Amino acid sequence: MNWRHFLTTDPEDLIYRKEIISEFRSFPDIVLKVRAVCQCILEIQSVCRAPSGGAFDTDSLQEFKLFRHAHDTLSDLADALRKQIEAGKLTSRGLKRLYEVVQEKLDRHYFKTFTEDWEAVTSGLDSIASYTLRFTMDEEMHVTQCAVTGIHKDKYVRKLLPFGSKEGRHADKLWDLGQVKEMRSPVEELLHDAMHIHYRQFLSTMRDMIEDLDDLYRDLNFYLAGLNYWRQMDSFRVPLIFAEIRPMEEKAFTATEMIDPVLLLHTRKAIANDIDFAPGGELFILTGMNQGGKTTFLRTVGTLQVLFQLGWPIPAATASISPVAGVVTVFSHEENTELQHGKLGQELKTLRAGMTDMTPDSLMLFNEPITGTSRWKTSTSPVRS
């Protein structure tokens, strides 16, 4: 997932996402149906991207079920959303719009009587577990004709072949399946002749559907990821809040008891800190002993800014933040001896690249950007330009 695609500076977008993720959290049954839709789309993508290129084989019979499965999962989600909306329990604009989008997808790809017609036409294909083939063979045991005589819901059970053993086997002894492999190729060839056109049409239909569902899949995964993040923070008993949205021109970033979620995930503990930029932007210089937490403090500021602009809650007691046009980071790194320049040269190039990306509405995070001139560590600086 390209997270940059979801970063926004629009306050209305941030409010919209807050409403969706908050209501998702309150309706776990709807979340389960959302996950089912995403899983179904993944399965269809896997079939459509298979290296076979659309060649039919006997296993392809199972794949036809995906067309019905996609219909059922989308319908289940639409029905669940509709019921909660009609009951007045879902009020966010986002989930009301989600219902409309899912219904539009269903109407575009399926006709009204799809369920009834599927049952009549497929004769149980959607619940297939095994099928029966009838062979006609010549004297040399070559298959000359093949027909499907039954599709069953029961699991396949190996049975004796319908002809006797020429190796003196006992009548009740099962044949080694290796003896059957010689018949597999002609059987698949006969099935291919009858089914490959339909299978290619099926794949073409599914590819069109996946292309149309791509935006829905991307957005649903974004909110599912937000819920997973929220649940992880809950497991650490960390308070999460939606930060107050300040205008961009105020260059505000005020937070109390903010916590670095990255550090929390790795160490299961973190120290809370406060920060308060003056209105209109400010330069902070943070100094201290090595391993004192300067880098963690800087990373916390950057991480909370990103979470805020995703529309997700942030780990803090209180927060008031302005959107930024970009987050520019310049962190010190180990010297690369394969380059022509020394460490100072590397750091200056990195610093210049970072400053090139700056705008008047950027958040700049400099972590010991120049250390190549002295044995002493330089300061860590968050800057609101």
Image (cartoon, rainbow, N blue to C red):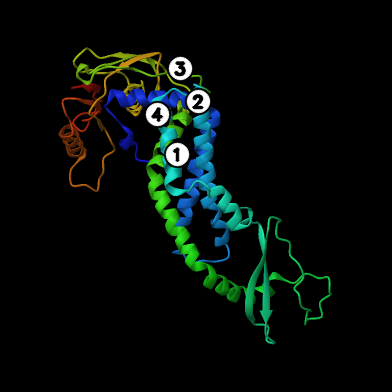
The alpha-carbon separation of the residues under discs 1 and 4 comes to: 14 Å
The residue type indicated by label 2 comes to Glu
First in sequence: mark 3 vs mark 4: 4
Say which of marks 4 and 2 sits in front: 2
Callout 2: few (<14), some (14-19), or many (20+) C-alpha neighbours within 10 Å? few
The residue type indicated by label 3 comes to Pro
Placement of 53 over or under 369, stated as above or below? below
First in sequence: mark 2 vs mark 3: 2
Identify the residue position indicated by label 3 in the image.
239
The alpha-carbon separation of the residues under discs 2 and 3 comes to: 32 Å
Callout 1: few (<14), some (14-19), or many (20+) C-alpha neighbours within 10 Å? some
The alpha-carbon separation of the residues under discs 4 and 2 comes to: 15 Å
Say which of marks 2 and 3 sits in front: 2
Say which of marks 3 and 4 sits in front: 4
Identify the residue position indicated by label 1 in the image.
103
Q: Find residue 86 and name its label.
A: 2
Q: Is residue 245 left or right of residue 37?
A: left
Identify the residue position indicated by label 4 in the image.
94
Placement of 337 over or under 241, stated as above or below? below
Callout 4: few (<14), some (14-19), or many (20+) C-alpha neighbours within 10 Å? some
Near-viewer residue (191 or 278): 191
First in sequence: mark 2 vs mark 1: 2
The residue type indicated by label 1 comes to Gln
Q: Secondary structure at mark 3?
A: loop
First in sequence: mark 1 vs mark 4: 4
Q: Look at the image and tell me whether residue 36 can be seen.
A: no
Q: Find residue 343 and name its label.
A: none
The alpha-carbon separation of the residues under discs 2 and 1 comes to: 15 Å
First in sequence: mark 1 vs mark 3: 1
